[in-house]
Amino acid sequence: MGKSYNIAVIPGDGTGPEVVRESVKVLKVASERFGFSLDFTEYDFGGERYLKTGETLPDSAIDELKGYDAILLGAIGHPDVKPGILERGILLRLRFELDQYINLRPVKLYPGVDCPLKDKTPEDIDFVVVRENTEGLYVGGGAFLRKDTPFEVAIQESINTRYGVERCIRFAFEYCRKRNKDKKLTLCGKTNVLTYAWDLWQRTFNEVAKEYPDIQTDYAHVDAITMWFVKNPEWFDVIVTDNMFGDIITDLGAMIQGGMGIAAGGNINPEGVSMFEPIGGSAPKYTGKNVINPLAAICAGAMMLEHLGEQTAADTIEKAVMEVTGKHLKSLAAGKMGYTTTEVGDLVAEYTSKL
């Protein structure tokens, strides 16, 4: 038996536990086949716990989670909890306090998946967005002046440090080199209007680029990026950007790869513990119906294995997902797949065991 990994599992809310169950099922098959072990420990952080206790994360949670090799997350979001409470109290707190300073979002169209873009195929849509994950507008810097009066002023600050920007950009260059596809890194920003933050990003990008002569670099405004994602997604290999722009363009990326049902992401701390999750929400209206698509959660599990260094197992799970999308599913939409949630997980597990 090879290495052993301790994995914290946060199934979360709504359909989160259902999709995480299928991801864990596939991960167990992969670990048995490729000779490593995964020890899972489940945590009940989410809406139900908050409604019972008034607590999002206990004070001990962060230090405890630092002791794991990785975290697998289902979904956070409960219809009976005011929007923002769980997101800030769990998701953002984990990202910030675990210093998961990279949000990694592959955008890849799989065989058999319907793409809303005319005449685009899997050969055209295969890129990765590297999003800075702990700075920018999401820091929460700002203030109100004369709140609730006709003269109210609201200030929202985007915080960008040289340290934070540079480590994100360096990660993107290293990832682009490791990915070894087109070896092209695009900086996505807004230098013509946001002159302070994006002056820092552009200068840092240009300086770090000198250390990577094998990587082709270019720049595009965020509004142009959204147009080209639709018109020419084949132009892109790896894109690096800030927290807000990354949040926006990755949702567009999810749509052109077939929807939230297939989109997975990682919140990465290369020196610490990282967290992997399906991009879609908790979908409470489908809870308990066994109809939700688990492929995004399964892909998140594959990303986790890649991060842990189990590349062959990760690649095999991705190939298994491609077999399922290419040969079996009628649709990625909940209730329209032609299979139950459990059956889709079984199909991926079966292919993982034999490919």
Image: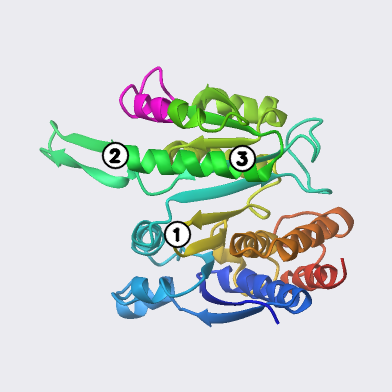
- Identify which amino acid the numbered label 3 is placed on: Cys
Three-letter code for the amino acid on which mark 2 is drawn: Ile
Q: Disc number at residue 159?
A: 2
Q: Quadrant for residue 313, please give it.
A: bottom right
Disc 1/disc 2 C-alpha distance (Å): 22 Å
User: Where, by quadrant of the figure, is residue 304 drawn?
Assistant: bottom right
Measured along the vertical axis of the image, is residue 58 above or below residue 235? below
Residue under label 3: 176
Q: Tell me: 21 left or right of 268.
A: right
Disc 1 marks which residue? 271
Q: Earlier in the sequence, mark 3 or mark 1?
A: 3
Check residue 77 for magenta coloring: no
Q: Which residues are magenta?
A: 190-204
User: Residue 27, percent across and down?
Assistant: 69, 72
Q: Nearer the viewer, residue 153 or 133?
A: 133
- Tell me the element at label 1: loop
**Residue drawn at (59%, 44%) of the image:** 175
Residue 101, x across and y down, in percent: 42, 51
Q: Contact, CB < 8 Å: mark 1 with mark 2?
A: no
Q: Is residue 200 magenta?
A: yes
